Image (cartoon, rainbow, N blue to C red):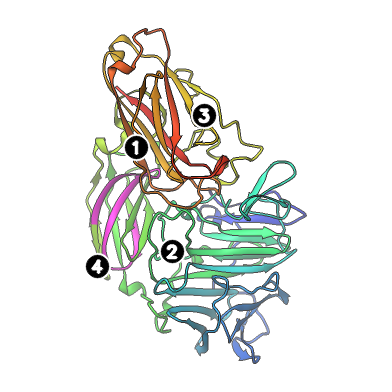
Amino acid sequence: MSGSVNRPVRRRTFVLGAAATAGTAALAGPLAQSASAAAFGWSDDGSNYVVDTGASLVFKVSKTNGDLTSLVYRGAEYQGYGGMNSHIESGLGSSTVTIRQSGSTILISVTYGTLRHYYAARSGENNIYLWTNKADTSVSATRYILRVRKGLFLNDEPDSYTYAPTAIEASDVFAKSDGQTRSKHYSKLRVMDYDYIGWTAGGVGLWIVRSNHEKASGGPFYRSLLRHQSADGGGLYEILYYGQNQTEAQRFGLQGPYVIAFTDGGAPSSALFPGTLTTPWADSLGISGYVGAAGRGRVAGVGISGRDTAYPYTVGLANSAAQYWGSARASDGYFSIGEILPGTYTLTVFKGELAVYTSSVTVSTGATTTLNTIAIPSSNDPSNASAIWRIGDWNGTPSGFKNADLMTYAHPSDVRAASWTGNVVIGGGSETSAFPCYLWKDVNSGLIVYFRLTAAQAAAAHTLRIGVTTAYANGRPQVVVNDTWTSAIPSPPTQPNTRSLTNGSYRGNNHTFTYSVPASAWLTDTGAYNTLKIHVVSGSGATGYLSAGTSIDAIDLLA
């Protein structure tokens, strides 16, 4: 999804940004700003270090705990709501906070146990650069939340609570009076889809430009809350590790920079984007864990053969210390991924979000590792298998299934959702759009697929495959054919153990369940419909949309 400015609400607009549209927006440069009479420098007011960037931005950081306590742009205060400051986690508590100026850079360092956090300002810029170094699990999660005063950027978008006062799940999913749902989780976006998040109103844009997420977890397709809006104020987030719907163990080390950026209402400059931003000025600042460009390498691939050109391909690199990714060129599969920490990585090629190739690659300091054309074996893509019928396609997502698009920004109970029940007949051409993207034990378990077989097909055993993208509470499919043959209950694959299907994410661990259906299970009357009942089974889960469930990638009966 590319960045866009949506329909204004009360003359204020809401923006989620991506690099694809940055060139069409009014840009504010990361360096040169309008002339200002203020002088670049810092002072101490007794409780805070006060930094004047020499442009239009003055901010304060608490000397006690490292909170960002004030954020004044063009004389107006933007920081804070509900008596709370902006900070790592929900505030670090008593910390050691220091400041020093090195030429045109001011660096504030915050030490809290094993965690190190940094704020940097550059002369003449309306930006704050942030780094966070998490060394271990003594801090439970890693996020930075920029808390923004109420009334400045009101909106009624999916991640807003402003006009949705009724809680319908936990304390973070709400319903409006018209039946639409809202939650801070409903961002619509995967990590790879956005470069910045924020708002614009009254000639002011306030943004967080994300980091490259090399020390985050979940890969390029991970979905997480990005911001929220309520009557109390708004929040912008940089989520570096979040326990919600995680597919990987967390990584430790320095993450950043991510940037708090003010503009004249346009998008932040693309020079601040991950993959574009360079910070040679930070090389000598002594930031714990910092590795400059000279200490990194690159991986480049000549191309990828065996692709299905109807789908985008992404190349990911991951090990226990870092993760990276890049898009493969549509014409030939060429890819290049830079600014990589040296080490050995698992390289994965994804068709859509489905892994279809893996190998190992080693990255060396200051060097480019060049790979010859990667050939994806035909058998690695399940779409290449000959099928009697297929619902959906194998791309690692529930795209095309009923309600799939809506579920990235709404609750399953949302009034806009089509009925989650209803059976499917093979051969009508609308099998995928009629099949619900999610199945739950307490909502639509027992859904029936009707299909005919030829005499030759009915005389043979066949393999049935059901691909899933995630599951909640160990929900997995058990099937019944013609009410005469019932599969065994499959073992649950490893999946995240938190909510997913109700908070905007189908992303988990792709898994394929296979069922060997004997010939004796089929009807011999070629004019009659065979029936396939798909049940969701689990000993866990609650009720309704929080009962055990799963997200569907594709279903097929192999020839």
What is the quadrant of residue 45 in the picture?
Answer: bottom right
Q: Amino acid at mark 4?
A: Ser
Extreme residue in the front direction: 539
> Which image quarter: residue 87?
bottom right
The type of residue carrying mark 1 is Pro
| Residue in the image at 70% along x and 55% along y | 155
- Between disc 4 and disc 3, the foreground one is 3
Range of residues picked out in magenta: 336-360
Ranked by sequence position, the earlier of labels 2 and 4 is 2
Q: Position of residue 422 (x, y in %)?
A: 55, 25
- Tag 4–tag 1 contact (CB < 8 Å): no
The residue that mark 4 highlights is: 364
Task: Return the residue at label 2.
Answer: 212
Mark 2 is surrounded, within 10 Å at the Cα level, by few (under 14), some (14 to 19) or many (20 or more) other residues, namely many
Residue 320 can be seen, yes or no: yes
Q: Are marks 2 and 3 in contact (CB under 8 Å)?
A: no
Closer to us: mark 2 or mark 1? 1
Q: Which residue lies under the disc numbered 1?
A: 490
- Mark 4, secondary structure of its residue: loop
In the figure, is residue 178 to the left or right of 294? right
- Residue identified by numbered label 3: 433
Q: Secondary structure at mark 3?
A: helix
Relative side of 41 to 558, left or right: right
Q: CA distance from mark 2 to mark 3?
A: 35 Å
Q: CA distance from mark 2 to mark 1?
A: 38 Å
Q: Amino acid at mark 3?
A: Ser
